[in-house]
């Protein structure tokens, strides 16, 4: 009998959503993590955002984020600038090209959200979202307690 536990089902759903988004993003020259960075920086354009805050948000190590940002810099999507108040810190900004890519990448995420919304309907979608947030909060609190 296949594993149908809650955590396994969430894992399967996450995998299918990631695959769906990745395939579409690859067609426009982006990886899924690059699109997440675009979205993160797009909605924080009026803030000072450093690499450490991106690492925390994405739950990735410094070397992983450094590599990701180098690739995005080579594509002309982001720039890393030395923080004037802390020379060890790098502030992140989208380039004009990165800003222009955001609605394209965001549209791909929105298509997936719309597909899920079609299946669930408004009431079930809100219940499902609430349950996911409740599970996430519980796991975060458990991790902090360690």
Image (spheres, rainbow, N blue to C red):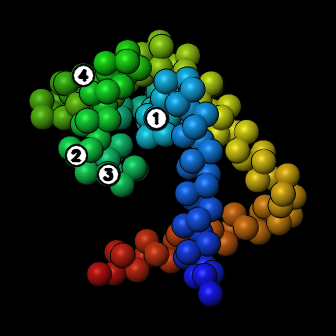
Q: Quadrant of the C terminus?
A: bottom left
Q: Which mark is residue 62?
A: 2
Q: Position of residue 100 (x, y in %)?
A: 55, 16
Disc 3 vs disc 2: Cβ atoms closer than 8 Å? no
Label 2 element class = helix
Q: Is residue 123 above or below residue 135?
A: above
Q: Position of residue 81 (x, y in %)?
A: 24, 22
- Marks 4 and 2: which is nearer the front? 2
Q: Residue 143, image x and y in percent?
A: 36, 76
SS for dot 1: loop
Residue 41 seen from this side? yes
Residue that label 4 marks: 81
Extreme-front residue of the structure: 1
Q: Quadrant of residue 132?
A: bottom right
Mark 3–mark 2 Cα distance, whole angstroms, equals: 7 Å
Image point 46% across, 35% down: which residue? 31
Cα distance between the residues tagged 3 and 4: 20 Å
For the residues labelled 2 and 1, say whether their Cβ atoms are less than 8 Å apart: no
* Residue at the image point whose x is 54% and y is 40% from the top: 22
Q: Earlier in the sequence, mark 1 or mark 4?
A: 1
> First in sequence: mark 3 or mark 1?
1
Query: Circle 3 — which element?
Result: loop
**Is residue 48 shown left or right of residue 27?**
left
Q: Nearer the viewer, mark 2 or mark 1?
A: 1
Vertically, is 104 above or below 86? above
Q: Which residue is mark 1?
A: 31
Residue 130 position within the rendered picture, expressed as x and y whole percent measured from the top left: 69, 68
| Earlier residue among tags 4 and 2 | 2
Residue where numbered disc 3 is placed? 60
Nearer the observer, 41 or 26: 26
Few, some or many residues within 10 Å of mark 4 (<14, 14–19, 20+):
few
Say which residue appears at 78% left-offset and 48% top-offset: 115
């Amino acid at each position: 009998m296949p594993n149908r536990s809650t955590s396994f089902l969430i894992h399967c759903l996450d995998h299918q959503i990631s695959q769906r988004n990745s395939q579409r993003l690859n067609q426009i020259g982006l990886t899924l993590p690059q699109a997440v960075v675009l979205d993160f920086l797009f909605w924080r354009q009026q803030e000072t955002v450093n690499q450490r805050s991106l690492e925390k948000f994405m739950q990735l190590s410094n070397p992983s984020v450094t590599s990701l940002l180098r690739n995005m810099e080579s594509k002309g999507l982001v720039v890393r600038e030395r923080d004037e108040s802390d020379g060890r810190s790098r502030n992140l900004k989208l380039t004009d090209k990165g800003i222009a890519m955001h609605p394209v990448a965001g549209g791909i995420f929105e298509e997936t959200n719309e597909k899920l919304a079609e299946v669930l309907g408004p009431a079930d979608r809100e219940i499902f979202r609430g349950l996911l947030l409740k599970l996430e909060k519980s796991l975060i609190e458990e991790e902090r307690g360690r």
